[in-house]
Amino acid sequence: MATWQDRPRCDEAPSWAPLLAHAQRAFTGKDAFDLRAGFAADAQRAARFSFEAPHVRADLSKNLIDAEAQRLLTKLAHECGLESHRDALLAGEPINASEQRAVTHVAWRNWAPATAESAPAALYSIADWRAQMLTLADAVRADEAITDVVNIGIGGSDLGPRMVVQALSAAQATSGPRVHFVANMDGHELAALLRQLRPEQTLFLVASKSFGTAETMRNALSARAWYQAQGGADVARHFVALSANPTAARAFGIERCLGFDEGVGGRYSLWSSIGLSIAIAVGREGFEALLAGAHAMDRHFAETPLARNLPVQLALLDLWYRNALHLASRCVVPYLHGLRALPAYLQQLEMESNGKRVDAHGRTVPFATAATVWGQAGSNGQHAFFQALHQGSDVVPVEFVLSATAAHSLPEHHRKLLANALAQARALMMGQPGDAPERHFPGNRPSTVLLLPDQSAQSIGALLALYEHRTFALGSLWGINSFDQWGVELGKRHAGEIENALLSPDADACAALDASTAALVGWLRQG
Ligand SMILES: O=P(O)(O)OC[C@H]1O[C@](O)(CO)[C@@H](O)[C@@H]1O
């Protein structure tokens, strides 16, 4: 069995070639696998490809996969040492090699490493950091003078908290202050919100792991300038930093900083102090329930054999579609208004984690990596891109995310919503012969259903941990380090140079730019 340091990449494992050969033989050409025939031939197909994990049931049976592909994929995962890599992640070993650190987001949901010696020092501070965060959340919720909380952050310091607050506020009445999110450098977002706020009633949370991200610093500076211009005189009370870099937060002028450790990646950080906006919105119990749901999924990932392990099986399906059937995108459609931000959250989680063309040893990989993730809430999406899903030239696997129950008191809505989701999945698969070509639905189009029992904090926590582990497992099979993101750096550097060129009246300021960028800067300077 390979250890996590020397495990083979998927294309070096013995089952890789048989897997690709099986895809070629059974899934291409005129006798290619057909879902309708697959169900007709196998009465057990729905059960065989259904999985149970804490708070999530998954039906993978309407995917372009058969028992042999599933067997080879699971064998491949064993050969790639996925279990030892997973155990190293959970034990707090330094698996993020390019940044020489452990990956600690699971520890923030009470995962205790097997041996105290293997635990990074940060794990011993997590309980303290969390206690401070929840105490502050309690205080803010109890403070009647604070009516509005604004989380200023971007990427992982925005998407996860924003989505969870939306999801949980849609499902339960919340009693705390209103919670808002500002991410975009486009000043319209902040300016529109500030018009609704009163400085003495507003608490700003400046959420940034690095405390150096351009958008967040710009928005925080403007928020503070607005606060002071409106007569606000107590920055210390009205601004809190959430950061792994308290020194930079203090240098910025914010004294109160809730910390967390560097091992928490930005896109994995909603469980840490970055989640303060969630704890303020749903209270201490709500936040703890979110962690408990995620922890239950952590246990499933850690303890369930790979053949029944849901995050692993989803990762293997992703690998099958990307590398064996060469499908370039996946559409995610949450039939849940509260989870309407899920596609945007997954774009960062999956594409920032696994959108890489070199492996953890720096070797260029000879296969495709992260698929494009896209989508929007159902049923809205039915009236936009479902036409292309049913009759377009590309086959796109669709992921339906559903909740069995709704928290509102409009039962007819929920029944219709669920019926629509299941109908779309069935129609994609069944297709329909048409009496005219434009009325023909080819069918045999794949989909997955992820079914939550409800939209509780536990269920949302479990769902997000499921996606995190799926992303890690897929990156692990590809030999990728899913926890760095060097690809975002270059654009940031160019932005600095171009801003200088935009500011400078001097024509030579564009001399170092390419002709296209220089011409665009010229137009912008003319207004
Ligand atoms: O929390 P920070 O340090 O402000 O970073 C925000 C986001 O920027 C990124 O570093 C990408 O630029 C993400 O990984 C991160 O979530």
Image (cartoon, rainbow, N blue to C red):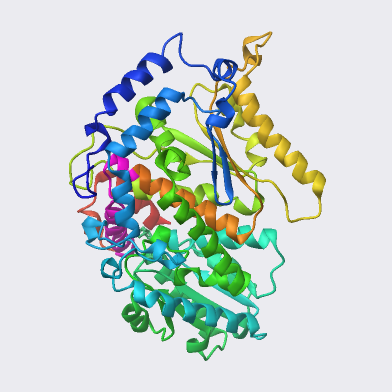
**Above or below, 70 relative to 58:** above
Q: Percent from the top left, x then y, of residue 431?
A: 62, 19
Which image quadrant for residue 193?
A: bottom right
In the image shown, does 154 or 112 lie closer to the viewer? 112
Residue 87 seen by the camera: yes
In the image shown, does 54 or 161 lie closer to the viewer? 54
Q: Which residues are magenta?
A: 475-504
Q: Residue at x 30, y 68 (%)?
A: 119
Q: Residue at x 62, y 38 (%)?
A: 381
Q: Percent from the top left, x then y, of residue 150?
A: 55, 72
Q: Residue at x 73, y 56 (%)?
A: 407
Taking the image as shown, residue 494 lies to the left or right of residue 340, namely left
Chief secondary structure of the magenta span?
helix
Which image quadrant for residue 333?
A: top right
Q: Percent from the top left, x then y, of residue 317?
A: 43, 34
Give the quarter of the figure containing the C terminus: bottom left
Q: Percent from the top left, x then y, of residue 114?
A: 34, 63
- Residue farthest bottom in this picture: 233
Taking the image as shown, residue 27 lies to the left or right of residue 460, namely left
Q: Residue at x 62, y 35 (%)?
A: 384
Give the quarter of the figure containing the N terminus: top left
In the image shown, does 312 or 520 lie closer to the viewer? 312
Task: Please tell me whether residue 49 belongs to the stretch shown in magenta.
Answer: no
Residue 154 seen by the camera: no
